[in-house]
Image (cartoon, rainbow, N blue to C red):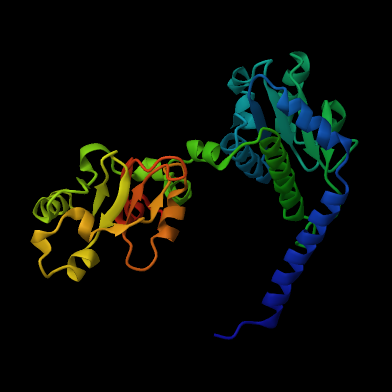
């Protein structure tokens, strides 16, 4: 179905307007931003983020981003704060109040509460002379550029800049704390993102479930282990219990003649591909190229002891693939 060309033009105009606003916001960051980061870093309590209307939606997302990147944070609705939720805020906390105009009536009680009990207040607004900006300990000012709707009535450019300011604060804090992917996974154990950050050690099979056989074992015993463990492979150990080889279906097919008269060491493929337990599971998936569906897990840079086995189906069930 053909679309009216003005639809595309309107979409491009909005995105270009907001993109230009973000560039202006970036170039205008000053010492106030650094002061806000310093204040947040030294907070012993939580970051309380609040805003009304569209600013409230942005505030919820900012609080969630803080919380998922190592900065304990909560959203408090400014209207609910006036009806008991102010008790959720302690003197150990820092409050971030968001209002484009800086004059939202619902924020008045929250702002007064922070002033009465000396709770640090960071204001995000576009009006430097507003009540929020003048009463806050630190004011993060957004450029006054007008909204992308062109009529100044739909929060668009202003909310985009506010969201970007929140992201900037959260990421700057995260980088200062050296917050790692492993830390991030602790806050995201579920879903595809958590799966992608899973370690091999989180998914591998260990203990008696790992198919292992001694190098001098008969192929009769070896086939029994392959059948019992259900991975379709078996790892071969030397006298020191180190992994020195692996027997797969391919090895069995190549040695069909006189197979039962051989030992595991005679049939195995030496120097098998392995994976370290501390690597991400998606790295193991990448290593399972071609016909490889299983990897034995070893600290192979220092120790060839078989610590476990990882099957591609384990990665599939966990959502890594």
Q: Is residue 257 visible?
A: yes
The relative height of residue 43 versus residue 314 in the rendered view (above or below) is above
The relative height of residue 299 versus residue 319 in the rendered view (above or below) is above
Q: Is residue 132 visible?
A: no
The quarter of the picture where residue 320 lies is bottom left
Which one is in front, 113 or 245?
245
Position of 254 with respect to 26 (left or right) is: left
The quarter of the picture where residue 261 lies is bottom left
Where is residue 13? Give x, y as percent.
Answer: 76, 69
Position of 265 with respect to 96 (left or right) is: left
Residue occupying image coordinates x 75% and y 39%: 99
Residue projecting furthest to the right:
129
The relative height of residue 82 versus residue 101 in the rendered view (above or below) is above
Where is residue 96? Give x, y as percent.
Answer: 72, 31
Q: Quadrant of the C terminus?
A: bottom left
Which one is in front, 131 or 218?
218
Labels in figure, total: 0
Residue occupying image coordinates x 85% and y 34%: 32
Q: Quadrant of the N terminus?
A: bottom right
Where is residue 87? Give x, y as percent.
Answer: 60, 17
Where is residue 281? Give x, y as percent.
Answer: 43, 50
Position of 293 with respect to 219 (left or right) is: right
């Amino acid at each position: 179905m053909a679309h009216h060309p003005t639809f595309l033009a309107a979409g491009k105009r909005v995105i270009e307007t907001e993109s230009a606003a973000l560039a202006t916001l970036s170039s205008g960051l000053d010492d106030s931003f650094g002061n806000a980061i310093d204040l947040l870093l030294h907070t012993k309590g939580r970051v309380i983020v609040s805003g009304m209307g569209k600013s409230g939606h942005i505030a919820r997302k900012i609080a969630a981003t803080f919380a998922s990147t190592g900065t304990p944070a909560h959203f408090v609705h400014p209207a609910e704060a006036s009806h008991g939720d102010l008790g959720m805020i302690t003197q150990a906390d820092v409050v971030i109040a968001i209002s484009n105009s800086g004059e939202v009536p619902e924020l008045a009680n929250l702002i007064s509460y922070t002033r009465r009990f000396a709770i640090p207040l960071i204001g995000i607004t576009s009006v430097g002379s507003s009540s929020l900006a003048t009463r806050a300990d630190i004011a993060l000012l957004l450029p006054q550029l007008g909204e992308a709707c062109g009529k100044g009535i739909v929060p668009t450019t202003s909310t985009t800049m506010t969201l970007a300011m929140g992201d900037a604060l959260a990421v700057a804090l995260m980088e200062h704390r050296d917050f790692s992917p492993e830390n991030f996974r602790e806050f995201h154990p579920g879903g595809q993102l958590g799966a992608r950050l899973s370690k091999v050690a989180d998914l591998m099979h260990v203990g008696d479930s790992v198919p292992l056989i001694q190098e001098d074992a008969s192929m009769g015993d070896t086939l029994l282990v392959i059948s019992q463990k259900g991975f379709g492979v078996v790892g071969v150990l030397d006298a020191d219990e180190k992994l020195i080889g692996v027997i797969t279906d391919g090895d069995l097919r190549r040695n069909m003649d006189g197979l039962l008269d051989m030992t595991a060491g005679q049939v195995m493929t030496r120097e098998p591909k392995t994976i370290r337990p501390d690597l991400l599971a998606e790295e193991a998936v990448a290593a399972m190229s071609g016909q490889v569906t299983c990897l034995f897990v070893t600290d192979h840079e220092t120790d060839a002891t078989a610590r476990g086995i990882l099957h591609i189906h384990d990665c599939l069930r966990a959502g890594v693939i």
